Each structure stands twice: as structure tokens, then as C-alpha cells.
Amino acid sequence: MSRTVVVTGGAKGIGRATVRRFAALGDRVVALGRDEAALSALPAAEAETRVCDVTEEGAVVTTFRDIGPVDVLVNNAGMGESAPLHQTTLQSWQRHLGVNATGAFLCMRAVVPGMRERGAGAIVTVASTAGRVGVPYTSAYTASKHAVIGLTRAVAAELAGTGVRVNAVCPTFVRTEMTDRSVAHIVERTGRTPEQAQDALAAASPLGRLLEPDEVADAIVHLASPAAAAISGQAWVIDGGGVQA
């Protein structure tokens, strides 16, 4: 039976791969994002699109009301910047928490009542290995990803036994535009070549390479499937074995 699947940050990177995966299963997929041009580039056969800033409470409430009952929510919208703690501005700190944590909170809050009432639903949030360990020079990003994993666990505990499952995935660096920006930042700060900077990021996991967006999307699709009916409150690490729990 076709499900209604909402993917935030659905026009690029992991979100784009996730949209494609769910569409291939025959689900109704709704991609949310702030970049109207990127959203408009999505094939109509794969996804409906809505412009929505997930940090804006009113926009989230209106958007989810218009979409109707949601069976699967994928909180993928996110941002990341790096800087030493003493150079991290309050604006950057608040922006990280707003997009990476508050955005997920607002979207969860919008769909949970309906899921609980129907006795079924799945929520998967894209966190990061930085949500499981401390990462130097990413205090705001790491704090926001720890926050969203805490949110995932609390909501999973609250919904235990209702048929609604709440999980997160924690990938290492993925071949996306966000990682491209990280590479550019390393080049700017260190004088390394782009290839050297990318190699340094790839070396952060035992895989010795960047993850592909489809690898993360596959984990998301599995956690949203009936095959994962007994899995809730988990934060799956996807890094080839570097972070073990």
C-alpha cells in the first residue's frame, strides 16, 4: 500500500537520494526545502514539492496541514559549519540548533498526533557521527546533532507501544554539497588542495572513502519499513565501524 512520505531537505544530497528510493517503492513522496529552484528540478513523477523553512513554526504547521496524514517523516534538513569554539558566533550556534534540532522537533510535533491516532508511523532523522562523539572545531554542529539524537530517544520512549517508531541515522562524511563546503573550508584554512582535503575527510572513517548518498538513503528506507518494526529509539552509525556502540 502506498504511503505518504515527507522528506525535509529533499532536493539535494541525502534527501534527494531518499526521495528517489521511496518514489521507486511507489510511495507518495513530498519533498520540502527552502531552495525553490532545486525543488523545481525534482521530477514530478518522483515527488510533490513544498517550499518550507523547517525552523519557522507557522510554515511547518501550515505545510503539514496541507499535506495531510503522514506515514513516514524523514528529517534530513541540516546545516554545518566549522570553527574553533572561541571563533564560533552566537548566530552560528543558534542557526545550527535551529535547523538541525528545532526543525526536526517542529516536524515531529506536526506528524506525531496523527501517527499515534492511527497506531502506525515511522520517523527517521539524519543525524551524524558527530552526534555520537565529540568532533574538534564543530562545537555548534556537534551539539545540535547530539540534541537531535536526544530528541529521537525521548520521543521514541514516549511513543513506545503505540506502533510509531522513531530512529536516527548517523553517517560519516557523505558525498554532498555540504561536504563540498567542508572541503572548500579546509582548502581556505590550510592551503591543501581540494583532493588532499577530501582525502582527509575520507580518512575519518575505516571505509577510507566518502559515503554515497544512496548508502544513507538505503538505511533510512529500511528503518521506515515493516522489516524494522521492532526498532525504535536507535541511532544507527554508518561509518564502516569507526564509532561502535
Image (cartoon, helix red, strand yellow):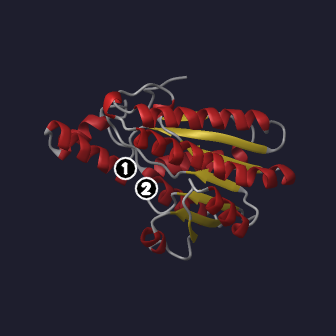
**Of residues 86 and 32, which is closer to you in this image?**
86
**Looking at the image, residue 108 lies above or below residue 189:** below
Left or right of residue 211, residue 68 in this image: right
Tell me if mark 1 has few (under 14), some (14-19) or many (20+) residues whose alpha carbon lies within 10 angstroms of its own. some
Instruction: Name, please, the residue furthest toward the top.
Output: 245
Q: Secondary structure at mark 2?
A: helix
**Looking at the image, residue 205 lies above or below residue 216:** above
Left or right of residue 168, residue 174 in this image: left
- For the point 35% across and 54% down, the residue is 177
**Of residues 38 and 25, which is closer to you in this image?**
38
Q: Position of residue 214 (x, y in %)?
A: 47, 52
Residue 224 visible? The answer is no
Residue occupied by mark 1: 178
Q: Secondary structure at mark 1?
A: helix
> Split into 4 quadrants, where in the image is the C terminus?
top right
Numbered disc in front, either 2 or 1: 1
- For the point 34% across and 38% down, the residue is 82
Residue occupied by mark 2: 13
Q: Position of residue 110 (x, y in %)?
A: 71, 54
Tell me if mark 2 has few (under 14), some (14-19) or many (20+) residues whose alpha carbon lies within 10 angstroms of its own. many
Amino acid type at circle 2 is Gly
**Where residue 117 is drawn, which disc sits there?**
none
Asked whether the beta carbons under mark 2 and mark 1 sit within 8 Å of each other, the answer is yes
Q: CA distance from mark 2 to mark 1?
A: 8 Å
Residue 69 visible? The answer is yes
Amino acid type at circle 1 is Met
- For the point 36% across and 42% down, the residue is 81
Left or right of residue 241, residue 186 in this image: left
Q: Position of residue 135 (x, y in %)?
A: 39, 28
Q: Position of residue 130 (x, y in %)?
A: 45, 32
